[in-house]
Every structure is written in structure tokens, then in C-alpha cells.
Image (cartoon, rainbow, N blue to C red):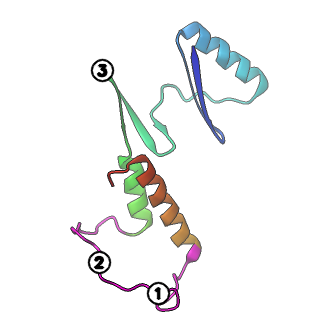
Amino acid sequence: MAYLLLYVDDIILTASTAGLLRQLTDSLRAEFALKDLGPLHYFLGIEVVRRVDGFFLHQRKYTHELLERAGMLNCNPALTPVDTKAKLSASDGSLASDALFYRSIIGALQYLTLTRPEL
């Protein structure tokens, strides 16, 4: 049995035996340029730590980089960081100064909350 996880140009490949894994890798290498990075450590923002009892997955690095990119690395936590009674309007207020940056941060936050719904 083998599993292949492919996202754009990132691949995770594992198999039930080392021989099968080698055979699959050789077949793929015959068709495509591959770079073997060794055992899995980081994939799509998810860090993988091997343990005796299995794998531990976390997103500490991804979250840290996202907070740094948004300029919020040194912010203090708050129970409710926004005004919960604010009335929002599509016509009031100012536009984001950099719409592309704003969309990028929002997309990264959406990905983080999809993979970590408790956040």
C-alpha cells in the first residue's frame, strides 16, 4: 500500500515497505525532476514531529511567521480584541491601505482556522 499527497509541487510519498517506496520514487523520478528532502518535517504550514507513539502535528512556525508578517508579533492577548457592539457599514470608514496585503493576511488566517478550528 502506498500514499501520495500532492499539492502543486510539494509531494509526500509513503509506502508500506521500503522496497515499494523506492520503486515508486524511481518511477516518478524517471518521469519528473524530483528532490528528496528526506523524512517529513514541514508541509503546507504544518510541522511534523516524529514520536515513538506516532506523529505530532502543529503550526507554531506558520503562526509565528503570520503574526510577524502582519506586524502583530509583540501584541498582547485580549479576551475580546474588538468592539462587539460596533455597527459595520460598507460605505463608512477608510479602505485598507494595501488591499493585496490585507487579502493575503486574511487568506492565511482562513487557512490557519481551517486546520486549527479551535482558534
Q: Image quadrant for the C terminus?
A: bottom left
Marks 1 and 2 sit apart, C-alpha to C-alpha, by: 14 Å
- The crowding category of the residue bearing disc 2, from other C-alpha atoms within 10 Å (few below 14, some 14 to 19, many at least 20), is few
**Dominant SS in magenta:** loop
Kindly identify which residue carries mark 1: 89
| Residue 60 lies within the magenta run | no
- The part of the image, by quadrant, that contains residue 67 is bottom left
The extreme right residue here reads: 31
Is 43 on the left-hand or right-hand side of 73? right
| Disc 2 residue type (three-letter) | Thr
The extreme bottom residue here reads: 92
The mark closer to the camera, 3 or 1, is 1
| Disc 1 residue type (three-letter) | Ser
- The part of the image, by quadrant, that contains residue 30 is top right
Which residue is drawn at the image coordinates 30% and 19% (left, top)? 52
Kindly identify which residue carries mark 3: 53
**Mark found first going from the N terminus, 1 or 2:** 2
Question: Where residue 58 sits: x, y (%)?
Answer: 36, 41
Q: Which mark is residue 110?
A: none
Which residue is drawn at the image coordinates 66% and 39% (left, top)? 9
Marks 3 and 2 sit apart, C-alpha to C-alpha, by: 43 Å
Question: Where residue 21 sits: x, y (%)?
Answer: 59, 14
Q: Secondary structure at mark 2?
A: loop
Marks 3 and 1 sit apart, C-alpha to C-alpha, by: 51 Å
Q: Secondary structure at mark 3?
A: loop
Query: Which contiguous range is marked in magenta?
Result: 72-99
| Residue 73 lies within the magenta run | yes
| Disc 3 residue type (three-letter) | Asp
Q: Are marks 1 and 2 in contact (CB under 8 Å)?
A: no
The mark closer to the camera, 3 or 2, is 2
Kindly identify which residue carries mark 2: 84
